[in-house]
Image (spheres, rainbow, N blue to C red):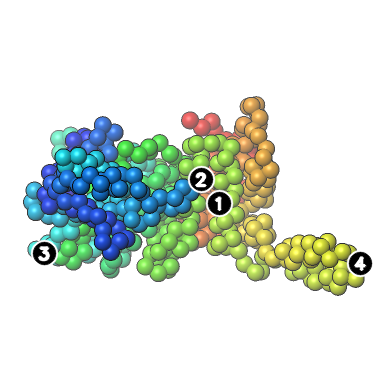
Amino acid sequence: MERIVKSLLNGDFEMYMSDCVFRQCGLDSPIVYEGPGLLTQTRDKSILLRVFAAPVDHSEAFSRQFNDDLTPGELVPDSQYYDFEGRDPYGTVWTANRISIETDFGYGTYVRARPRTLEKKEERSKPVERPVVVAFLPGKMDLPWHAVTEKGERGWSLDRFETNAGCLEWRVAKTDDGAWLTFKCEDSPVEPRFAAFLRGLSILVGRRLKPICLSIFEGEQQTTKVLNRLHEPDAERLLAPVSAQRDLSDDAHLFLERFMARAGEEGEFGEGACGLAHQYWYRILRSRESDIENSSLVLSVAVEGLVKKTLLSKTDADPEFVKQAEEAKPILKKAGLGPRALDCVLSSLGNAKHPRVSDALRRLATEGVASEAHIKAWKGLRNAAAHGSVLEEDGRALQEHLDRFHVCLDLYYRLVFVLIGYNGRHTDYGTRGWPTRRFRLGRELTASTAEPVSTPECA
């Protein structure tokens, strides 16, 4: 695996393949291309798969080239995808599913594809004691490195982030080109647990982590995957909830432990609430790098969505208002309004009785999770973006926008803390200087009445 990773990073990954087969998906009588193949990397380090198949009759080639079963505006049907398998020089079978191909017809048939994932399965002579995933994550990763690696005469290096949390164990080892991640658990399947851990770790470090190669060990079986990702842009960064200082390593591990515990409660570490929190977080990450104004709408909607789907309670509705709304209905019906106007008023009144996101946020404020400053920043950010406001080319206006964004981001992270039950230290992006503070459920916040203030200049 280390050899594969090294060649991928250098851009010289190459593998000759035999007995290659492309088989069309979704049809009882699929198109099949067979022949020798070659895996290489292009200049941008993406993986290109080429297969040299037998020639096709001219009329059939013409039909395949121009009679695609495609309709503009509709999803690509299964018949446009192919499954692949081929043998490497050691006789091991590699597979890839649902990939698009390009074909050139002539004296032979030249097939090209860029598979997202290549996979091989092998049997081990000795089973592993615990299910394990070993993966390589390219690029710089900011973590509170705390474990020391002795390097003999070269001294030592602070380059590991690791813990044993009982039924789960993880170790991240830093290298010049990225980091090796080792993840262990007690039970199978390990892959969905690893995927959940990777989501939590991505939020913790403020960037989406995408392995380029990983090996999964379960029992006597080893599955190796090569992922075609090195050509993808990887400049997106978001402020992390916990600082990467060494003395915060226990808090970082605690965040991951709580994240995994909540994910485990959702059954086989499925998407659930933690998956939703990561999905919203990833939207914020992408929009933040592309559009400073659009990111404000994405962030405010993420706060609203997370509250609605995970934290909203029937008790958040105002009982006094609900009572008044019920008492108003018979009065309105006797007011002599036209049927259309009456239906509109009654409908609005009925919707107003349901608990709102702002009601839930106020409840969380009374519990010490958020503050009035958070609620004010969220409303200001959401209303300005939703009603088409344009950011003025003015230093003060830009600073006010950044202040609201960072306070709202702080609110989002606090919602995630509530969701997973985290009560460790974090970076408070709602307070000047972004200090480190301990997050406590059910206690009054130190800065519960503070207004959004100017934040340090961002790079």
Inter-mark Cα distance, 4 to 1: 42 Å
**Residue hosting label 3:** 126
The amino acid marked with disc number 4 is: Gly
Inter-mark Cα distance, 3 to 4: 83 Å
**Residue hosting label 2:** 284
SS for callout 3 = loop
Res 174 seen here = no
Classed neighbour count for the residue bearing mark 1: other residues with Cα under 10 Å, few (<14), some (14–19), many (≥20): many
Pointers 2 and 1 in contact (CB under 8 A)? yes
Q: Position of residue 208 (x, y in %)?
A: 39, 46
Classed neighbour count for the residue bearing mark 3: other residues with Cα under 10 Å, few (<14), some (14–19), many (≥20): few
Q: Residue at x 8, y 51 (%)?
A: 90
Circle number at residue 302: 1
Front: mark 3 or 4: 4
Q: Residue at x 59, y 44 (%)?
A: 297
Q: Quadrant of residue 200?
A: bottom left
State left or right for residue 204 relative to residue 36. right
Q: Residue at x 48, y 37 (%)?
A: 289
State left or right for residue 133 relative to residue 379. left
**Residue hosting label 4:** 336
